[in-house]
Image: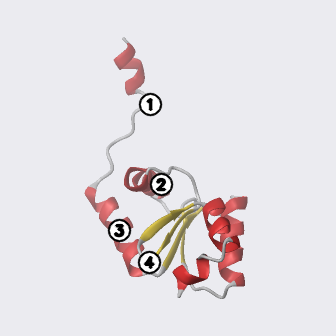
Amino acid sequence: MFEFITSWFKSEPISPKIIEDINSTINSHKVVVYSKTYCPYCKSTKELFGKLNQDFKVVELDNVSDGSVIQRGLKEITGQGTVPNIFINGKQIGGNSDLQSLYSQGKLLGLLA
């Protein structure tokens, strides 16, 4: 009975195509931010990159048809299920608090160089 009930909450596996698309996006841009338009932490992240005049690719998960699937794919790849999910030079650095911490420690500009 328990397995039957928990099966209602299980998601379909993420297709290899979605994982491939995520990895392609991450590897095709110096900075990638997976975001949602209404998220205040995402806004803070985008504002910091703007303040630094840093070009970045933003994927607004609430504005793309497969956004929830992409977010589940990101969680599968990185273990992080929240936004913003930030990548620099193909490596995940985490979310907004991680980005702000790197900036306040003076380490962010080195990553962006």
Q: CA distance from mark 3 to mark 1?
A: 27 Å
Residue 28: x and y, percent? 39, 80
Ranked by sequence position, the earlier of labels 2 and 4 is 2
Label 2 amino acid?
A: Gln
Count up the numbered dots: 4
| 98 sits to left or right of 9 | right
- Which image quadrant: the N terminus? top left
| 10 sits to left or right of 64 | left
Please name the residue that numbered disc 1 is placed on. 9
Q: CA distance from mark 1 to mark 2?
A: 16 Å
Please name the residue that numbered disc 4 is placed on. 89
Please name the residue that numbered disc 3 is placed on. 23
Residue 17: x and y, percent? 28, 61
Residue appearing at x 66%, y 64% in the figure = 42
Please name the residue that numbered disc 2 is placed on. 71
Q: CA distance from mark 1 to mark 4?
A: 35 Å
Q: State whether residue 38 appears in this view.
A: no
| 53 sits to left or right of 62 | right
The local crowd at label 2, few if under 14, some if 14 to 19, many if 20 or more residues have their Cα within 10 Å, is many
Label 3 amino acid?
A: Asn
Q: Is residue 12 above or below residue 91?
A: above
* Circle 2: element type: helix
